[in-house]
Amino acid sequence: MSYGHIYVAQVSMGGSQAQYLKAVKEAEAYKGPSIIIAYAPCISHGLRKGMGHSQTEMKLATECGYWPLLRFDPRLELEGKNPLQIDSKEPKWDKYEEFLLGETRYLTLTKSNPERAKVLFAKNKSEAQKKIRHYKRLASLDYSEGL
């Protein structure tokens, strides 16, 4: 996104199938480089619900703010619009730890070092909140008169 001429999308099929499909269509139609960054749980994440629930895990990752959905389409700037569109709703931060504890890769730390886990989980959430605030600032810029 910092280059300004590359189509970028952050997607999650479980977070929003409609946003996922829209991003794929836009990326394909864009006459230039495109990148789609997708959240996809893998067996190494250790989904406690099982891999059969990966769509549910993706949805929770988006709902809690761990994986926001967005699209950056440089063509919008030519129309006087902000190229960054945040597609996910306001995060439900109270679900953040539920998401983390749903994956063995995070849960293991709570068993081996509970105090350290509390600190790192709080830092993880804080960084996610910081990232969302940054995206919101960028998405609120006025492009109607050019930059």
Image (cartoon, rainbow, N blue to C red):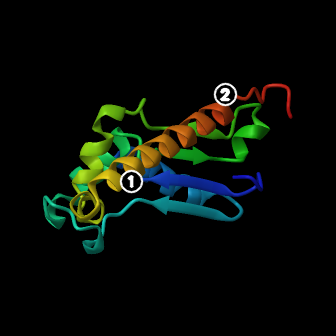
Instruction: Kindly identify the amino acid type of the residue bearing the numbered disc 2.
Output: Ser
- Would residue 82 appear left or right of 120 to someone viewing this image? right
Helix or strand or loop: what does disc 2 sit on? loop
Q: Residue 69 vs residue 138: left or right?
A: left
Q: Position of residue 23 (x, y in %)?
A: 50, 52
Q: Circle 1 — which element?
A: loop
Q: Amino acid at mark 1?
A: Ser
Residue density around tag 1, few if under 14, some if 14–19, many if 20 or more, within 10 Å = many
Q: Which residue is mark 1?
A: 12
**How far apart are labels 2 and 1 at the CA level?**
23 Å
Q: Looking at the image, can residue 97 be seen? A: yes
Residue 140 shows which numbered tag?
2
Contact between marks 2 and 1 (CB within 8 A): the answer is: no
Q: Is residue 92 visible?
A: no
In-front residue for pair 26/8: 8
Among numbered discs 2 and 1, the one appearing first in the sequence: 1
Say which mark, if any, is on residue 30.
Answer: none
Near mark 2 (Cα within 10 A), the count class, few <14, some 14-19 or many ≥20, is: few
Q: Nearer the viewer, residue 141 or 75?
A: 141
- Give the residue displayed 43% in from the left and 37% down from the top: 88
Q: Give residue 1's position: percent from left, percent from top.
A: 69, 52
- Total of numbered circles in the picture? 2
Q: Residue at x 85, y 32 (%)?
A: 146
Instruction: Please tell me which residue is depicted at 60% across the width and 32% down the height of the picture.
Output: 136
Identify the residue at the far bottom of this view.
44
Residue 24 picture location, percent across and down: 49, 57
- Which of the two residues, 26 or 82, is positioned nearer the viewer here? 82
Q: Quadrant of the C terminus?
A: top right
Q: Nearer the viewer, residue 109 or 81?
A: 109
